[in-house]
Image (cartoon, grey):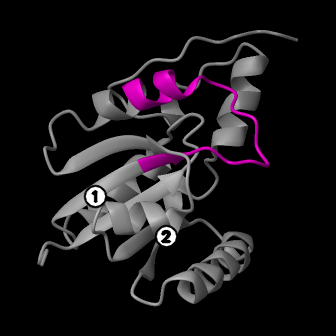
Amino acid sequence: MNSKRVAIFPGSFDPITKGHESVVLRALTLFDDVIIAIGENSSKKGFFPIQQRLSWIRKTFEDYPNVKVEAFSSLLVDFCKEKQAKYILRGLRNSIDFQYERNIALINQELNSDIETIFLLTKPEDTAISSSFVREILLFGGDVTKFIPSKITIEPIKYL
């Protein structure tokens, strides 16, 4: 039996933001291992390739051996079972996030009652940061340095 406290932090991380980074770093005080899991979301088309996102996340947490980074294409609860994780970690920026994440947590609880969802509030300075805002800034040629982890760089795209 695995006695380690393992949490899965699922998301698209398209791209990873300082908010995501903060949630993971704070979660390391609660869990033995955190697995950042990029899920293939059937309702979302990725902006950046999964391999690029995996690379950015690995670079961000290269100094933290208890942070693992993987992609998965199954039900989250099945991935948790495969990784012997009893916790799903989610970051909340606002009440809209809470309503959305609460419903997902309830469904996951129905699918596997052994897995708990743990919500961490983002720090106030990270509340406005989202991957979609970062992508929008990039599309208009803006600098996203303030919003992404310091170990990575993402060049403006300027598609528009």
Q: In this view, does 143 lie above or below 37?
A: above
Q: Give the range drawn in magenta.
A: 37-55
Amino acid, disc 1 = Val
Is 51 part of what is drawn in magenta? yes
Toward the right, the furthest residue is 160
Q: For mark 1, what is the residue?
A: 34
Q: Where is residue 119 in the image (x, y as percent from the top left)?
A: 47, 76
Q: Is mark 1 on a helix, strand or loop?
A: strand
Mark 2 and mark 1: Cα distance apart in space? 15 Å
**Does residue 122 show up?**
no
Q: Residue at x 36, y 75 (%)?
A: 87
Q: Quadrant of the N terminus?
A: bottom left
Q: In this view, does 15 lie to the left or right of 18?
A: right
The residue located at (62%, 24%) in the rendering is: 48
Residue 108 to residue 6: above or below: below
* Vertical arrangement, residue 7 with respect to residue 95, above or below: above
Left or right relative to 84: residue 144: right
Tell me which numbered mark, 2 or 1, is placed earlier along the sequence: 1
Q: Residue drawn 38% across and 62% down?
A: 8
The quadrant of the image that shows the C terminus is: top right
Q: What residue type is labelled 2?
A: Val
- Residue 110 shows in the view: yes
Which residue position is annotated with label 2?
77
Asked whether residue 42 is drawn in magenta, I would say: yes
Relative height, residue 29 to residue 102 (above, below) = above
Q: Residue 69 carries which label?
A: none
Location of residue 55 in the rendering, given as x and y in whole percent from the top left corner: 38, 24
